[in-house]
Image (cartoon, rainbow, N blue to C red):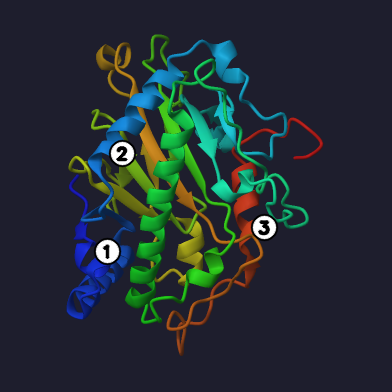
Amino acid sequence: MQLPLIDIAPFLAGDAKGMATTAARIDEVCRDIGFMVVTGHGIPKSLFQDSFGLARAYFAQDMATKLAATPKRSDVFRGYEKMGTRYREAGPEGSKVADYKEAFMISALEFDAPDRKPAPVGFEGMYAPNFWPSEPESAPAGFRRNFEAFYRSVDGLARTLNGACAMALGLKQDYFAPFFDGHASTCTWVHYPAQEVAPEPGQMRIPAHTDSTSLTVVVQDGSTHGLEIRGRDGVWRGVEAPEGAVAINLGDLMAQWSNDRWVSTLHRVDNPPREIARTTPRFSLCFFQKPHVDAEIACLPNCAGPGNPAKYPPVKAGDYIRAKMMRTRPKTDAAA
């Protein structure tokens, strides 16, 4: 499936006509499917290529080495996450199966600073420092430096898209900016291993789900049988993006924020056919944008009116996101 293609370069250039055209196109796409492919973002292809190379090298290490960067608390989404950690609903009666993937996660880089601000009360796990493996003993040389560069780049892209989304909704370009001051957005490098052992019944690389975020940035490695979305006709179709482009999708939070003017669409990462799955791994680089946990998410201006009342009561972003995140991870300690 070829997703709508949006060139963000005119928006970045500050051209008034180009910005208005881009915003109008984003509104059209977000009303229809909530997925798009963005080009013209200015992030060098070399950064993506280096990131994929380091991800391959990191996940190729032995399990004991990778597990050394695993947090002990289940509410801390940082460091290494082994296969069998995340569970999703699948099949009848709400049964759950594990994702067929492993991952390494970080959050905002300022959480690593010795003089970082105290975490909001009750959200210590979401504001915990990152888990960085030692180099080169537990990660390839340059792993942290590159990961940080990737985080800064996609965070910047997400903030640019916030401005475009605000204009698309008839708001001032900087409307969303205060909501993301001190945010705890996460960046995840994902490895879907070659499936030497066939998945369990109903098990996929990632089963069908929607994201809990405001928006998600995904860089794919170009392998086949990857990200799929379910169209309005109920048919699942693979998503392709040109090299250097990024896939963007809205999350549940933005759908609720916009009073369902914009949609959060079901997507999944399917298993390849067995003859391919046995030998073909897949990698993706993801950024999940989340407002500050204390940000109040209430119906946006211009998204309700006569005959279209606000559907959802206001909610704190942290409460909303944490509840959805924890449903994918079993409670293994008192902190959860």
Amino acid type, callout 2: Leu
Instruction: Read off the residue under disc 1.
Output: 29
The numbered mark, 2 or 3, whose residue comes first in the sequence reads 2
Instruction: Read off the residue under disc 2.
Output: 47
Instruction: Read off the residue under disc 3.
Output: 319
- In x, y percent, where is residue 238? 25, 39
Question: What residue lies at 60% left-to-right and 49% top-to-bottom?
Answer: 324
Amino acid type, callout 3: Asp
Secondary element at tag 2: helix
Q: Quadrant of residue 194?
A: top left
Circle nearer the viewer, 2 or 3:
2
Distance from the alpha carbon under mark 2 to that under mark 3: 34 Å
Secondary element at tag 1: helix
Distance from the alpha carbon under mark 1 to that under mark 3: 28 Å
In this rendering, position of residue 203 left or right of residue 75: left
Q: Quadrant of residue 276?
A: top left
Question: What residue lies at 55% left-to-right and 61% top-to-bottom?
Answer: 291
Secondary element at tag 3: helix
Amino acid type, callout 1: Val
- In x, y percent, where is residue 140? 44, 21
Q: Give yes or no for contact between labels 2 and 1 (Cβ–Cβ under 8 Å).
A: no
Q: Nearer the viewer, residue 332 or 75?
A: 75
